[in-house]
Amino acid sequence: MEVFSHLSGLDTSERTAKQSMHFFLSEKEIVNTVPVPPPLLAFPLRESKMEQREMPRLKLGSQGLEVSKLGFGCMGLTGVYNGPVPEEAGITIIKHAFEAGITFFDTADAYGPHTNEVLLGKALKQLPREKVQVATKCGIERFDAGGLRVKGTPDYVRASCEASLQRLDVDYIDLYYQHRIDQSIPIEETVCIY
């Protein structure tokens, strides 16, 4: 079925632009909403009703953390390999992922940098926090033309965690881990900060 048959008279650039302005609501219906990146058009999304679909769950580790079997990596929403999506579009995408049954959202202080955590935090305000598991990371102090600077000192990790809590605007982070390992610091020192 040609979902975008109404776009067939447009040239390729016009068609791509028009397609990026739509979410799928069903196989037969398309509703004009906020812009989303074309790769997300493959996901069947429905009108927002905050009803969550069931998705298989699994346990991570041995401390009782249970997450949806499919997680959502938020990196692309604020651009790393692509341009960032508008804030409202990012929030809408996160909410649709939650409605599709995804409860595990991954971000990092390095994404944006920092803006990805802020975006996820804004989306969390519109979701039941007790049903969402948030993972975020530290360890990349910066990356630029000079390369990647990794840092894993206890003081840096503690400060990074506290800053992530503030940017996410949450009381707790479900899974906090190192993005990259600082080879100059014994891992026992990095992880035993509290």
Image (cartoon, grey):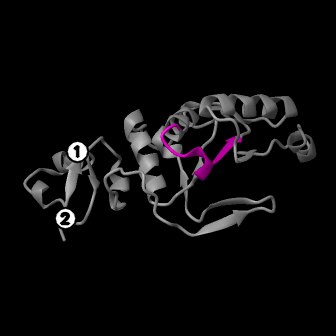
What mark, if any, has residue 79 been given in the picture?
A: none
Q: Position of residue 95 (x, y in %)?
A: 44, 48
Identity, as a three-letter code, of the amino acid under mark 1: Ala
Residue 86 appears in view? no
Residue 49 x/y as whole percent: 37, 51
Q: Is residue 123 above or below residue 99?
A: above
- Residue 126 shown in magenta: yes
User: Distance of mark 1 from mark 2, alpha carbons?
Assistant: 20 Å
Q: Which residue is mark 1?
A: 17
- Which element carries disc 1, helix, strand or loop? helix
The residue drawn where x is 26% and y is 63% is 26
Q: Which secondary structure lies at badge 2?
A: loop
The residue at the point 58 percent across, 36 percent down is: 117
Q: Which residues are magenta?
A: 125-137
Q: Is residue 162 left or right of residue 39?
A: right
Mark 1, other Cα within 10 Å: few <14 / some 14–19 / many ≥20: few
For disc 2, the marked residue is 28
Residue 45 is situated, as x and y percent measured from the top left of the image, at 34, 57
